[in-house]
Amino acid sequence: MKILEINKFNYLRRGAEKHYLDVIALLKANGHEVAVFSMDNPKNDFSPWKKYFVSYAGFEKNDPWYVKLKGLLRIYSFEAKKKISKLLDDFQPDVVHIHNIYHHISPSILGEIKKRKIPIVMTIHDYNLICPNYSLVTDGKNWEDLREDKFFNFVRRKYFKNSYVQSFLVYAEYVFNNTFKFYEKTVDMYVSPSHFAKNKLVKHGVDQKKIVVLPHFVKTDYAGAKCDLKNRAKYAFYFGSISKDKNVKQLIEIFKNLPELNLYLAGTIDKGFAMPKGKNIKYLGFLNQAEIEKYIQNSLFVVSPSRLPETFGLIALEAIKNGKPFIGFAGGSFSEIIEDNKHGYLCGSEEEMKEKIIRLATDEGLRILFSRQALERAEDFNSNSYYEEIIDTFQRYVQK
């Protein structure tokens, strides 16, 4: 099968990109011909399809103002439309698999794909379809709590990036997409990584008949996922976005009161987030996948302070894949990966999280038990099962 994979970033950035890159590798390993369409970026992995990529538009700290303006105004891109048209004509895919395209590519490409009667499957990585700020929550403010005058309140409260201008523009993009129904008219099937995310989409108007639940996967090679029974370094590990929305500051405060236990953090620090200092707090910077796995395997356990309604708890899956217990908050999609008091703990409050952190850090026998059970649980998210289901989803439409 010829499959076109599309995502706005073509390098390991966050969880969405990891899944996108893992899917490409999985499809290629099973003999499929895979092309990619993305945005040009100096951080991109090498790709023979680069000549088709849409030009760079970004919001990075060092980007010049005109590049940021291009990103803010890329609600609909004629450049992307032209370039995807050329790629489609040259590659002629049987199916197109979309990940994240908003802001940097735009839904302008969808009509060109559909015009050629090529089926479109879209994996959901966030809530951009139903919420302008795509996380449903920002700075403690909940999109779902806005009942009236949503536009006015969204902008006034700076729901997106704590900025009036960016809040206005992403809301305008949201209205634009909903008015012209780009996704509704073109996407044949949405792939939700959790039942939790599916329920959110359905609640906000997405047709449940067009959603299939298919969790993310881990590679079936567990050679590196060794259950280390003799931890030498006493640290808990968090990796991902280091931001206010992810509740990282509160996690650091918990550990500052636990001087005998270190907290290692890895990931990109969001703009405006001031990293609190502490003798037992160590920031490792942005790590590649191999480095992340090394730190997971040498940790006591993995912890996440996020209370966001995550579409999928990839940090929890990475923990159990590497044979480590996971501690997080109950709610969201974590409960579809972690069983409380079996693979780790799902807490109801910060006080409970602190209590469970202390318990797991001081009880080696419990860590060993949870670690063994975590590895067993990880086998439920194997790549073979994912592959069979995603190919079945593709073929359902290719055969029509």
Image: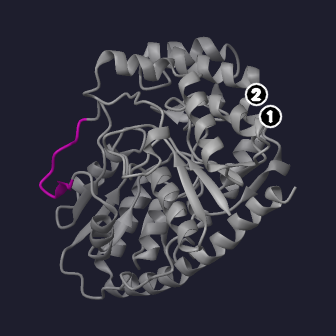
Quarter-of-image position of residue 88: top right
Residue at 61 percent of width and 29 percent of height: 81
The answer to whether residue 163 is above or below residue 254 is above
Where residue 181 is drawn, which disc sits there? 2
Left-right relation of 371 to 24: left
Extent of the magenta region: 274-284
Residue at figure coordinates x 77%, y 35% from the top left: 115
Whether the residues at callouts 1 and 2 have beta carbons within 8 Å, the answer is: yes
Residue 200 pos. (x, y %): 70, 44
Residue 283 lies in the magenta-colored region = yes
Q: Assess disc 1: are there few (<14), some (14-19) or many (≥20) residues with their C-alpha within 10 Å of its C-alpha.
A: few
Q: Is residue 322 left or right of residue 125?
A: left
Circle 2 Cα neighbour tier, 10 Å, few/some/many (<14 / 14–19 / ≥20): few
Helix, strand or loop for the magenta stretch, by majority: loop
Name the quadrant containing residue 31. bottom right
Distance in Å between CA atoms under marks 1 and 2 = 6 Å
Quadrant that contains the N terminus: bottom right
Q: Is residue 25 above or below residue 56?
A: below
SS type, badge 2: loop
What residue does disc 1 label? 185
